[in-house]
Amino acid sequence: MPGLNSSVQRYDSSTGIPKDVWTTFRANSARANVILPHAEKVFGLQTFTPRIDPTGQLWLVYSKPGTSEIKFILSCTKGPLDKYPLFIVPTDPIAELTPELLKSPMEVLCNMLLNEPGFRKQRVFSVFSVKPVTEAFVLAWETLAKIRRHEEPYYDALFTMCTKDTLVSQQRAAPPSQDVVLAPRFAVEQDVEKMAVLCHRFAATSVCLFLHSFSAMKKAREEAKLMIANKQVWVLEIQKPNEEPDIASIVAVTRKSKDVAAITKVYTPEEWRGRRCAERLVRYVCTELLEKYEQVVLYVGVENDARRVYDRVGFKGLSEGAPAIDGVENWLEIGFDQAKVELGHW
């Protein structure tokens, strides 16, 4: 009788990803925003500069035993800067993802990773998925890999989306003062140094300070250069009379697929907060993106005041007392003992 591991197929850059898996990705393109765009870059289906290194890219696909019905896709991949967390995309509605249903598939995925030739368990520094999947995977990994979780979750977030139907059009808001000029635009090469500082500050807001290390500014500068070269980041330029222009807010969109674009970084320096700079720029970016994509998605911390900003722009399910909305889900990133793993970056 075949073991449960026969329910899992593994794919890498040499094997390619089969058509049925691509079909599943695209049928779940909003949830799969953490996996699909990167996979498309690895296989040359999206243009990215420089080309993504095809080595060190692994996908595990779990199907319901005895069927070809895909239930979970796990990615263990690396981007242009460093290793990504494990991402796990389920295909079932979140209400069906019970601990009893999840226990066996997560144990199977953990065993597949641990038995992967050349795989080191220290590679798994965190996992990010819908909350019940993350919790089930962590329980299995702690037991099988013998590495404890970090006591505080790295990221407890709501996944939400904005469409043309929900986007709140730009209201004719006055600038912060009559003598200030605001201009949204793509970041350009001349912005690299300012962008590097802002990327570094953004990383410092995370529980797991992936950029807060000896080479922090160097990595932040690399990140800024990559986003600018690939036209992935907008800035809100602000200028007062007789002063040099400054960057009042940034919005990065580093993951895109056919129908979905994901806002992946929003940051406003302290000196420009309280002026609705982020709201202006997020609304502008969403308006631009929704000319091409069906929806714009993002994650926002459940306790993050930015929820109000995104709610005013038109992202679903973020207002106080909002009813449950299909697709708006709690996602959770849990890390593992930092003394026993090798941190990455995303």
Image (spheres, grey):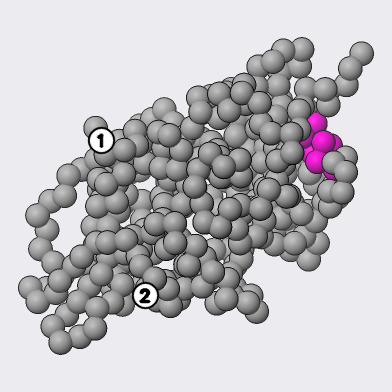
Residue at left offset 79%, top offset 44%: 141
| Disc 1 residue crowd, few under 14, some 14–19, many 20+, Cα 10 Å | some
- Span colored in magenta: 108-114
Q: Residue at x 25, y 35 (%)?
A: 164
Q: Closest to the observer: 121 or 195?
A: 195
Classify residue 213 as left or right of residue 60.
Answer: left
Question: Is 76 situated left or right of 311 in this image?
Answer: right
Residue 337 located left or right of residue 227: right
Tell me the kind of residue under disc 2. Answer: Gln
Q: Residue flagged by tag 1: what amino acid is it?
A: Lys
Majority secondary structure in the magenta region: helix
Q: Give the labeled residue for mark 1.
A: 164
- Residue 60 x %, y %: 72, 34
How far across and how far down the image is residue 40, in percent?
55, 40
Q: Is residue 41 left or right of residue 139?
A: left
Q: Quadrant of the C terminus?
A: bottom right
Can you tell which quarter of the image residue 160 is in? top left
Can residue 324 be seen in this snapshot?
Answer: no
The residue lying furthest to the right in this view is 1
Quadrant in the rendering for residue 243: bottom left
Q: Position of residue 31 (x, y in %)?
A: 51, 35
The residue under the point 85% across, 41% down is 116
Mark 1: secondary structure: loop
Q: In this rendering, does residue 229 appear at all? A: yes
Residue on which disc 2 sits: 190
Residue displayed at 35% across by 67% down: 188
* Element type at mark 2: helix
Q: CA distance from mark 1 to mark 2?
A: 33 Å
